[in-house]
Amino acid sequence: MTAPGVDEGVRPKRVVVERRLHPVTPFRRAWAPVAVVVGWAAHDPNQAQEQLTRLTTTTLLIVLAVVVSAASLYGFLSWWFTHFAVTDSELRIRTGLLFRRTAHIRLQRLQAVDITRPLLARIAGVAKLRLDVVGADKKDELAFLGESEARALRAELLARAAGFAPETAHEVGEAPARELLRVPPRELAVALILTGATWGALAAALVVPPFLWLATHSVWTVLATGVPLLGAAGASSAGRFVGEYDWTVGESPDGLRIDHGLLDRTHETVPPGRVQTVRIVEPLLWRRRGWVRVELDVAGSANSVLVPVAPRAMAEAVIARVLPGTEVPATAALSRPPRRAGRCLPLWWRGYGIAVTDTVFVARHGLLRRSVALVPHAKVQSVRLTQGPWKRLWRLADVHVDTGAGKTVTARLRDAQEATELLHGQAERSRTGRRDARSDQWMA
């Protein structure tokens, strides 16, 4: 029986309900006015010290009360005037008290929906939802939501982006994940110790300051140089260990899920069909143990690491999930440049090689730190051939393969005739690859 005034077959328009962020959010945003005061003091510390010495205790308490009140009011108002709502086709985020901003994020343009939980947020039981959108320069985010609400909203957004009906999107829930790989902390620590960048940064931090002291006898010069070098050494070892701790890769219908972090936990998703390039990196000191690192180029996304360290066989099994039907060619199967390439690049020419399979274009470079790049034919945007005067003299050329992530993979020092054939062949493979490529849609 049809209700009066409602035509049969016409679905009533769904009411869009706006929601607010978690009530703990004002405490996070209240730091903005305090940061302005701290920034002013840091900009001119002498003047700030003079102003503080002139203030009486009563005046100082009044100033402190005003700053705290202003910070609290700013945090509350910024939270009160921030709303978000999920419609049938988009996520709307409305912010601003004086200057209003409304972001309309189309669900079909979603590239990834990640959950991050900084240490203080984990203590408070909240999480940050970060949205990767195709064509956006930076990620939009909802900070903060309750942990359960963040996971439920993420599942709903992915379900709607996958084409589920709005009335059933709430019931779909987060797709289950099957663990593919987990990096043991001990293995990660050993890998970082065996990384050349760690030792290089540490050596620079220990060697450069003494030389500067002998040359300048200035403590400030030594500190201005030594402290950043020590920070770089720590970031290349301890920082990476904390960030990549308990690295777990799982497989689900909405892509590969990556969880990692000792203090700040991050829950990321590698979107299906969005990966432009996969790189297998093999540092010199890792080869004896058979370890590799797997990195990604994902269009419009900051996700760059798939596996921080793992045995080669396990890493290739994960790559097979990212690029279905792809087998990583063995080192012996890669074609080296002709020997006359040594006239253009002595010794290092031996580190280059290429291979072309039915699914990917493969290029290798590096002798000490080997890197093998795999580009799916469907993701190639353009192919170029370059040949300078010296290479033209030795009948050599480079073939550049440009991907949708704005990156380029190059087959260097190839025979000129081979490069020309590779250029035309890759253009044809890219055309047919895009025609037969799998859908980029979530859960497709």
Image (tube, rainbow, N blue to C red):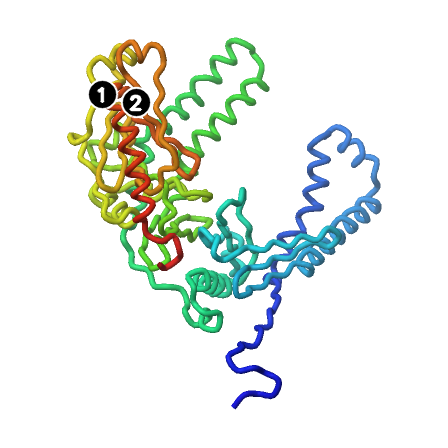
The quarter in which the C terminus is drawn is: bottom left
Give the camera-side residue of 344 and 262. Answer: 344
Query: Can you name the residue that lies furthest to the bottom here?
Result: 1
Q: Would residue 218 appear left or right of 162 to someone viewing this image?
A: right
Which mark is drawn over residue 52? none
- Disc 1 target residue: 337
Q: Are marks 1 and 2 in contact (CB under 8 Å)?
A: yes
- Residue at 48% of width from left, 73% of height from top? 167
Decide which of 417, 134 is in the foreground and name it: 417
Q: Report whether residue 259 is seen.
A: no
> In percent of the image, x 52 and y 90: which residue is there?
1
Q: As displayed, is residue 218 above or below residue 172? A: above
Relative to residue 385, is residue 427 depicted above or below?
below
Residue at the left extreme of this rendering: 332
Coordinates of residue 259 in the picture (x, y in percent): 38, 52
Give coordinates of residue 78: x percent, y percent.
Answer: 68, 55
Residue density around tag 1, few if under 14, some if 14–19, many if 20 or more, within 10 Å: many
Q: In the rendered image of this protein, does residue 128 appear above or below residue 302?
A: below
**Alpha carbon of mark 1 to alpha carbon of mark 2: how far?**
8 Å
Q: Amino acid at mark 1?
A: Pro
Q: Secondary structure at mark 2?
A: strand
In the rendered image, which quarter is residue 7 located in? bottom right
Q: Is residue 356 left or right of residue 11?
A: left
From where the camera sits, is residue 126 visible?
Answer: yes
Say left or right for 182 vs 1: left
Residue 59 position, x and y percent, is: 84, 45
Q: Amino acid at mark 2?
A: Arg
Q: Which is more toward the observer, 379 or 128?
A: 379
Q: Badge 2 is on which residue?
A: 412
Label 2 crowd (10 A; few <14 / some 14-19 / many >=20): many
